[in-house]
Image: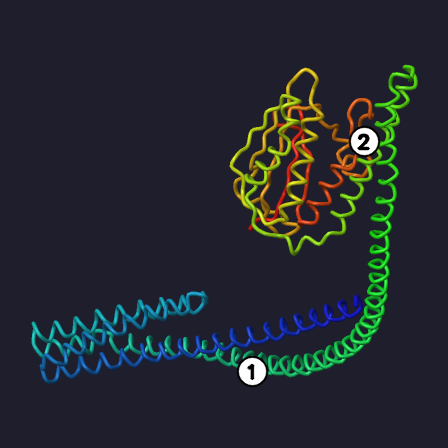
Amino acid sequence: MSSSIWTLFLIFCCLVFTTFISYRATLGLIEDNILVLHSQEVIEQVLEVSTNIRAAEGRQRGFLLTRDPEYLDRFEKTLLTTDKHLLKLQKLVSDNPGQLIKIQKLKELFEKRKINMREVVDVYQNKGEEEGRKFLILGGGLAMMREISLLAENIQETEKLLLKARTENSSESRDYALKGLVIGALFTTALVLFAYFLLVNDLRRRQEIEKSEANARDNLEQKVLERTQELEQSNRELQEFAYVASHDLQEPLRKIQVFGDRLKQKAADNLDESSLDYLERMQSAAKRMQKLINDLLQFSRVSNQDTTDNVAPINFNVILQEVLSDLEGSIEHYQGQVCIGNLPTIKADPLQIRQLVQNIISNALKFHRPDALPEISVVWHNQASFSDPERKQNFYEIAVIDNGIGIDPKYVDKIFAPFQRLHGKAEYEGTGIGLAVCRKIIEKHHGYIRVLPSPEGKGTMFVLGFPSI
């Protein structure tokens, strides 16, 4: 693939180079043609100047012979037209100092001739025909006209030489451009054909690779399907085992508790203090074992339960009120205070969300500071939906904030693992399953749970993210 890319890059560079050469040749041809047209225009303008000067002489003579004012009017208009042509000539040859000097000389001669012709007309009008004829012969007009004609011819000859040279350059540029375009076209065609065969070969090779990958993917999918079926079967067997094991374990535990209670009731007076302590320890261990089994069953149910059928829009405030009602005894025992904000409606399994909130609030009550009564706030952390660019999903964030003992940031990941405890059983009772169940519930709802320090600096803030609806 890398080789193909480099080959295409080289082809592209060759095409750019060929295009550049053709462009330069075409540009040179255009510039040469412009110079040819420029020389032609200079020759035409010089010819116009010569023709107009002769026309002015003819109209002057017409007036002198007929005294018709129309000839005089045409005479003046011809002089003005000649001035315009001379100005245009000066602009055209401004890039050629030699020709510019000649044009300026031509203009000076024309100014003298123009004054001379007007003086002849003035003498004819004011002093009579005889004086006018003498002035016409002696005024030097013929010499001036001869000098103008010679200078105009010289300017034309010089420009014709330039025209010839520029025409030859134009022909060479045209031939060069034509050859460049032909060679460029042939070269481009060859490159395109080469690129075509290269791409066809690369495409054929890629199709073979894709076919091989497709076969490998089909085989992998088949293996994954088989493995998934095996895991599902294993999961079902594990669930059946967990149910049977829990049932078989709970039954002996209940008997231990029942017989322990009976023994305590009937023989308490006959037992010494040490025996009573052993009995209490046995009863306590049986209760812890039963709670652990119940928590394990709950974690197993949450892990394997499909929440799709039970998901519905629920008001978080309603769920929270139900949880607080269930925890009323614990709240009174710990003398806790729970403040509730205006919470959003989410789409979730009501029973699992109740379990989630109950576990977090129970922990907030249990892990309170000895020097302060529990204070818990449940608020909508982000009033607007929070956007997670990685998941391309908007989330509602609900925060449960307490003033308890807090959690060291280095243990944040540890607290969500089953049976992981940060404190001994003597300090705080529990099995270490509660937060693992919370994380499993939140994952089932395609959300997230985060642990942050409390904004007040004491305690913990659990942030629960639910997909917005």
The image quadrant that residue 291 belongs to is top right
Toward the viewer: 245 or 302?
Answer: 245
Please indicate whether residue 379 sits to the left or right of residue 360 in the image.
left
Toward the viewer: 292 or 448?
Answer: 292
The image quadrant that residue 203 belongs to is bottom right
Toward the viewer: 135 or 247?
Answer: 247
Q: Secondary structure at mark 2?
A: loop
Crowd tier of the residue under label 2, counting other residues whose Cα lies within 10 Å: few below 14, some 14–19, many 20 or above: some
- Residue ID at (51%, 73%): 31
Q: Residue 114: x and y, percent?
A: 23, 71
**Vertical order, 217 against 238 (above or below):** below
Amino acid type for the residue under numbered disc 2: Arg
Please indicate whether residue 85 sits to the left or right of residue 340 in the image.
left
Circle 1 is placed at which residue position? 171
Toward the viewer: 412 or 343?
Answer: 343
Please indicate whether residue 279 sits to the left or right of residue 431 in the image.
right
Mark 2 and mark 1 residues within 8 Å of each other at the beta carbon: no
Q: N-terminal of the two: label 2 or label 1?
A: 1
Q: Residue 73: x and y, percent?
A: 14, 76
Q: Residue 386: x and y, percent?
A: 58, 44
**Vertical order, 159 against 357 (above or below):** below
Dot in front, 2 or 1: 2
In space, the residues marked 2 and 1 are separated at their CA atoms by 95 Å
Q: What number is the disc on residue 64?
A: none
Amino acid type for the residue under numbered disc 1: Ser
- Residue ID at (32%, 68%): 87
Circle 2 is placed at which residue position? 421
Q: Residue 401: x and y, percent?
A: 62, 30
